[in-house]
Image (spheres, rainbow, N blue to C red):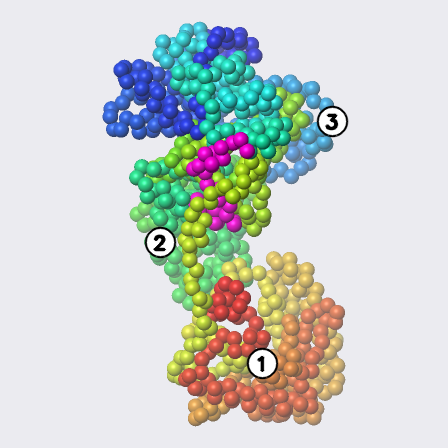
């Protein structure tokens, strides 16, 4: 047997000769059950013969399925099972080669993480040499794709020297650069780097093991039976092993779903996208033809295909033969072919998932019945799993879930995001509200302190970065002890991570260890170290394994920029799948098309049959274009389409099958899969059966009945407010329910977390700056540098929003324009004898309503005095000002009420005087920077008197206990309200759902 210094080459091996023993199990029959039935029948007289049999199957899942098939047929009787070994991930233990000299000399397979890190360094160096952005996370993703290309080259036995035959001028500029990289990195540098680590590429090692096994058996045929079952021989080394096994004295190869009835002319015209193309390629590699293949178990002449198989074969026939469809559609037995077939076209993906979940749930009503959903659509699979959970059914999903979406994976990501953001409010809350976060406290105590910190410090505008700024804010809040303790614990837990992320460069192992230490410290509880909950369960074990792999391979990357670590971690965690080890329903499964090969169930559901989803469009390869793949001798991309078609045809031949698709996915129309369209060309639409599942899905979540009526709360008089600000009076006019919620229920809306500066902040800043300026210059003409002084006040007020580009680039230039306009206008008015009497002045007006005192309060932006003794009520507006018509109609009574209060002497800082005008100063910047809207002049007294009379009538109406607080007594004047969701306006107001 050759040593590692003399690797076996498939091309150099002598051809396998002799008559092969090739058999097939037709599609439509359960492959594993049929195989198990025959082998059990043969071993009925000698159970030890079955135990001596070695069965090689494509995957570990196929081995489990075959084992379960044997056990089902044993019905609890003791049984010596045959040895079942997978081919797809073969190792020396699986292939019974352990301990042989040749295998001992084989280097181990290089660890995937180590290889990806080494390749990522090559990618980064290439990008830097080209002057491109060098992001480590993207480099790892490209490294993973490069590793797949290397494995594919090894699998197919392709020679990297073929890169020299490619003509660069025939390629686009991008591919020319890629070709240069592959020549240098993949062909020249990578083998030396790999050999320096004393390792082999995984695909190359697998090939060597398969070839060693084949040549070992060819030299010394085993005495026990050997069967290769269910493999399509897509790996050339596997095909060679199958060729040897087929010619062993006690060997046999059992092929899945070979079409023995296809016409010879159609067989010769097969293209890579046809279901049988891979089988034809396999027979050629086995140096055999269809005449050498018989039906399992005894061989012999093929029986006519079943009506279902005949329909599928005709629908998926080569394109050149479709002219015969009009005749074949009449000759096929459609009734028999479609017996057991259901076709569901749902409106959208959620409806499709609900229908599938109901079908699978119905199967559970039949004892021992099984069902499997086969789909490449991961979103559909997740939806179906979620729908089944409503019946507490946890389904076996072969693809598992992403580690990044699991509890520990998400927590590790959130800890990193929080530290990188400088403990920004949203990232901090997302992390500390995670179920694992406790910071050494009881979970309830930690949440209590966090909620107080959120309400007091984290809502509204973002505080300055870092925990010191947050500690300063918390210290100013009454009873801050619990909040400060929480902040101190968080600072201590994250200090190593923050320090590691702060440097220019850092070793990856240092970053990973600091990351893990921070996560464990945050996850700790009294008496429970954080490592215990963090690494618990299947997801915790997967996360721990990822961390160990990263630490083991960290040295291969060397020092990295800390800012690259998040992208690296995100890429790594997204590539790990978590599969629960227990607690799954034994009779339901969700499988991908590849995992479903050789599988069977009483009900087979083929979901997501839309073009682009099934078959899956070949993913773009960043390292090899189609032309490059052809030149390198790699299989065409259409080969995968053919394999997908074979999967579909085999599964669709099941006795009871449901074909489903959604007409819309994510609100976008879809196109039926090419296989459905071909079936539709042969099958009359009226023949398809839809079954009851779509109707069940519609009734699964019945509507909640008629929408609720508009709320009309009628609190007792004792609970109704008696003191109203002028803005509350306006609210009582426009949205009484909002005033009820705010002042009677005492519900205050929360500010958004990490709230960006908005229009209200801009208005508040300008108000405060102008008030401070006017208060400092109440009398006499303004100084010559008044504009500079006002701008200086504004600069100080805007400083806390310096981090926001919208403030620097839009708000500040407009404020400067407003400042110059304001000073000019103020100077003009003072020259005319108009001077400020008060700014931000408070007042109160007492009214007797049916013997009960009501108080109207106001804070006027500004009141000026004219030389004729009249006052001017002024309001600053940075938004849209109220119109005179709205004031006269009583919908915007704030300024008229302030005018009435001035006339009644309700402002202590201002001597009683009639209001001669109401002015709204619109300060918007731009052209013009500002303008004065004169709402009332000669008729100001009348507008004020009407507003006061309206308030008296309004208070009188709400002094009646039968008067409800409605949400929209005047819908056209209501606008958006903070309490509309509480009033469920969307249900009764004609605006859609609340």
Q: Secondary structure at mark 1?
A: loop
- Name above or below for residue 778 compared with residue 929: below
Q: Residues within 10 Å of mark 3 (few under 14, many from 20)?
A: few
Tell me the distance, in whole angstroms, between the alpha carbons under discs 2 and 1.
Answer: 49 Å
Please tell me whether residue 379 belongs to the stretch shown in magenta: no
Query: Which residue occupies 35% across, 16% down?
Result: 53
SS state under label 2: helix
Which percent across, then down, holds residue 905?
A: 57, 91
List the residue tagged with mark 3.
170
Question: Viewed as shown, does residue 150 lie left or right of 405?
Answer: right
Residue that badge 1 annotates: 891
Return the x and y of residue 982 as percentages of the image width and height.
46, 68
Q: Quadrant of residue 893?
A: bottom right
Q: Describe residue 610's horizontal placement relative to residue 875 as left or right.
A: left
Label 1 Cα neighbours within 10 Å, binned few <14 / some 14-19 / many ≥20: many
Which sits earlier in the primary sequence, circle 2 or circle 1? 2
Q: Is residue 350 magenta?
A: yes
Residue 876, above or below 513:
below
Judge whether residue 526 can be spotted in this image: yes
Residue under label 2, please give it.
443
User: What span is in magenta?
Assistant: 330-357
């Amino acid at each position: 047997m050759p040593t590692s210094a003399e690797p076996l080459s498939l091309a150099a091996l002598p051809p396998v000769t002799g008559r092969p023993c090739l058999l097939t199990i037709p599609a439509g029959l359960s492959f594993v059950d049929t195989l198990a039935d025959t082998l059990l029948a043969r071993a009925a007289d000698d159970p030890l013969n079955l135990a001596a049999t070695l069965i090689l199957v494509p995957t570990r899942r196929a081995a489990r399925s075959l084992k379960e098939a044997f056990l089902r047929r044993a019905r609890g009787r003791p049984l010596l099972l045959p040895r079942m070994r997978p081919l797809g991930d073969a190792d020396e233990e699986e292939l019974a080669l352990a301990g042989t000299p040749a295998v001992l000399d084989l280097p181990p397979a290089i660890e995937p993480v180590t290889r990806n890190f080494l390749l990522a360094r090559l990618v980064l160096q290439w990008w830097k040499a080209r002057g491109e952005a060098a992001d480590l996370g993207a480099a790892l993703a490209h490294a993973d794709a490069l590793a797949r290309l290397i494995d594919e080259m090894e699998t197919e036995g392709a020679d990297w020297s073929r890169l020299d035959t490619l003509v660069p001028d025939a390629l686009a500029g991008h591919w020319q650069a890629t070709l240069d990289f592959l020549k240098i990195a993949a062909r020249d540098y990578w083998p030396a780097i790999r050999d320096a680590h004393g390792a082999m590429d995984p695909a190359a090692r697998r090939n060597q093991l398969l070839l060693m096994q084949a040549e070992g058996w060819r030299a010394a045929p085993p005495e026990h039976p050997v069967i290769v079952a269910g493999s399509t021989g897509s790996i050339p080394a596997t095909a060679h092993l199958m060729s040897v096994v087929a010619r062993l004295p006690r060997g046999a190869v059992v092929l899945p779903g070979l079409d023995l009835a296809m016409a010879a002319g159609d067989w010769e015209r097969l293209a890579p996208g046809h279901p049988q193309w891979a089988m034809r390629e396999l027979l050629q590699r086995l140096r055999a033809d269809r005449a050498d293949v018989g039906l399992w178990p005894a061989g012999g002449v093929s029986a006519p295909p079943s009506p279902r198989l005949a329909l599928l074969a005709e629908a998926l026939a080569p394109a050149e033969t479709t002219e015969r469809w009009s005749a074949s559609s009449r000759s096929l037995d459609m009734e028999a072919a479609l017996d057991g077939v259901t076709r569901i076209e749902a409106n959208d993906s959620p409806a499709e998932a609900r229908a599938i979940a109901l079908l699978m749930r119905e199967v559970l009503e039949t004892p021992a019945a099984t069902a499997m959903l086969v789909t490449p659509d991961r979103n559909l699979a997740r939806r179906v799993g979620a729908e089944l959970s409503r019946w507490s059914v946890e389904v076996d999903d072969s693809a598992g879930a992403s580690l990044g979406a699991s509890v520990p994976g998400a927590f590790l990501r959130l800890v990193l995001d929080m530290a990188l953001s400088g403990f920004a409010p949203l990232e901090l809350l997302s992390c500390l509200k995670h179920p694992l976060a406790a910071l050494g406290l009881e979970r309830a105590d930690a949440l209590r302190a966090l909620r107080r910190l959120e309400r007091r410090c984290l809502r509204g505008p973002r505080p300055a970065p870092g925990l010191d700024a947050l500690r300063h804010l918390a210290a100013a809040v009454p009873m801050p002890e619990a909040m400060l303790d929480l902040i101190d614990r968080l600072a201590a837990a994250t200090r190593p991570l923050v320090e590691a992320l702060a440097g220019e460069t850092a070793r990856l192992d240092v970053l990973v260890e600091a990351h893990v230490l921070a996560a464990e410290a945050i996850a700790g509880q009294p008496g429970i170290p954080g490592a215990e909950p963090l690494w618990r369960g299947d997801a915790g074990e997967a996360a721990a394994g990822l961390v160990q792999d990263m630490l083991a391979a960290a040295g291969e990357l060397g020092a990295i920029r800390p800012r690259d670590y998040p992208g690296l971690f995100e890429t790594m965690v997204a590539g790990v799948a978590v599969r629960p080890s227990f607690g799954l329903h034994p009779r339901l499964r969700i499988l991908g098309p590849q995992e479903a090969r050789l599988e069977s169930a009483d009900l087979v559901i083929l979901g997501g049959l839309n073009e682009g989803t099934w078959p899956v469009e070949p993913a773009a390869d960043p390292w090899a274009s189609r032309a490059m793949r052809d030149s390198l001798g790699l299989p065409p991309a259409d080969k995968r389409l053919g394999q997908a078609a074979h999967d579909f045809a085999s599964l669709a031949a099941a006795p009871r099958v449901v074909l489903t698709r959604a007409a819309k996915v994510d609100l976008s129309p879809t196109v039926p899969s090419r296989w459905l369209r071909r079936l539709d060309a042969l099958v009359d639409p009226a023949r398809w059966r839809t079954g009851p599942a779509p109707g069940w899905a519609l009734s699964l979540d019945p509507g909640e009945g008629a929408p609720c009526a508009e709320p009309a709360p009628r609190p007792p008089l004792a609970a109704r407010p008696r003191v109203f600000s002028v803005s509350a009076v306006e609210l009582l006019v426009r949205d009484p329910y909002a005033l009820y919620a705010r002042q009677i229920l005492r519900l205050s809306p929360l500010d958004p977390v990490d709230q960006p500066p908005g229009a209200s902040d801009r208005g508040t800043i300008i108000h405060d700056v102008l008030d401070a300026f006017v208060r400092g210059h109440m009398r006499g003409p303004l100084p010559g540098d008044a504009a500079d002084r006002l701008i200086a006040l504004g600069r100080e007020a805007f400083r806390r929003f310096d981090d926001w580009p919208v403030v620097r680039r839009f708000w500040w230039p407009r404020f400067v324009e407003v400042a110059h306009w304001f000073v000019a206008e103020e100077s003009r008015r003072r020259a005319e004898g108009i001077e400020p009497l008060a700014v931000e002045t408070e007042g109160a007006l007492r009214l007797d309503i049916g013997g009960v005192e009501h108080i109207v309060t106001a804070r006027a932006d500004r009141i000026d005095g004219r030389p004729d003794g009249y006052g001017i009520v002024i309001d600053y507006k940075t938004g849209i000002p109220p119109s005179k018509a709205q004031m006269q109609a009583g919908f915007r009574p704030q300024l008229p009420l302030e005018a009435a209060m001035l006339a009644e002497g309700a402002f202590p800082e201002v001597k009683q005087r009639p209001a001669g005008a109401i002015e709204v100063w619109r300060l918007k910047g731009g052209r013009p920077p500002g303008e004065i809207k004169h709402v009332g002049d000669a008729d100001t007294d009348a507008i004020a008197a009407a507003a006061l009379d309206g308030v008296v009538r309004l208070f009188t109406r709400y002094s009646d206990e039968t008067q409800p607080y409605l949400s929209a007594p005047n819908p056209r004047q209501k606008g958006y309200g903070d309490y509309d969701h509480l009033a469920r306006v969307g249900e009764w107001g004609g605006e859609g759902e609340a």
